[in-house]
Image (cartoon, rainbow, N blue to C red):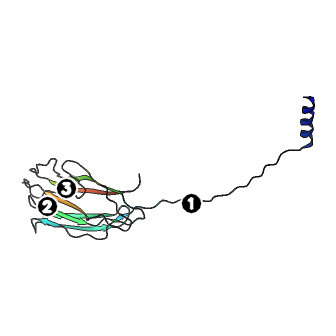
Amino acid sequence: MMVSLFALSLLALSGVGFAVYSASVTINGTASGGTLVLGTSSWASGTTTPTGAGSCAWSDYVAGSPATITLTVTNMAPGDSCTASLHIDNLGTLPMTSESTTFAGVTGYFCTSGGYTTNCFFVTDSLGLQSYVGSNGANGLTVSPGGSYPGGYWVTVTYASGSTVQSESASFTITFTGSVGT
C-alpha cells in the first residue's frame, strides 16, 4: 500500500499525465419565414336580381397589407339583391391553407333573423357568412403562391322583400383572412 502511494506521489510531482485529442466543426445557419400576401387582380361589376335592379359595382381597390376594395350597391327596391365576385390572389411565397370571413355591421340596418320581413339588408358570401345570424364564413381550400381562390369569391347583398321604408342605408365591413401554418 505504501509503495502505491509513493508511486502516485511521484507521478503527481513529475507532471506526467494523459493527453486528450479534440476537434470541432462550426456550423453557421440562417432561417427566414415566408410570406402570405393577399390581393385582387380582377373583379367584375356585380349582377343584380332581378336583372337591371339597382347598381352593384366594385371600386377603390388599394393594394397593400391589408388590401381593400369597396362594394357599392345603390337604388335597391325591396326584394332586390346584388351578387359581386372578385379574384382573391395569393401574392406571397407560402400556400394559403384556410380562409375565413368576418362581418361587422358598421352603420345602418341589418336583418337579425332569417325572416327578412323588416326594413333591413342581409349579406352572405361564398364562404358561408350570414350577417342576419351573425355567422362567419370558413373554408379549407389551398391556394398556391401565385394562385387565386378557387371559383372566385363572391358577396351578395339583399334588401329584405318586406321592407317598407324608402332611402334605407347600411355600411358594413367584411374581412377575408387567409392562413397558413398550424
Q: Which residue is mark 1?
A: 30
Q: Position of residue 122 (x, y in %)?
A: 17, 54
**Looking at numbered disc 2 in the image, what kind of residue is underneath it?**
Ser
| Image quadrant assignment for residue 177 | bottom left
- Mark number, residue 5: none
Q: Which residue is mark 2?
A: 81
Outermost top residue: 1
User: Which structural element holds mark 3?
Assistant: strand
The quadrant holding residue 96 is: bottom left
Q: Which residue does the numbered mark 3 point to in the structure image?
A: 123
Mark 2 surroundings within 10 Å by alpha-carbon count, few (fewer than 14), some (14 through 19), many (20 or more): many
Q: Nearer the viewer, residue 63 or 11?
A: 11
Mark toward the start of the polypeptide (1 vs 2): 1
The answer to which quarter of the image holds residue 171 is bottom left
Dot 2 falls on a residue whose secondary structure is strand
Query: Between tags 3 and 1, which lies in front?
Result: 1
- Estimate the x, y position of residue 148 in percent, counting from the top left: 32, 66
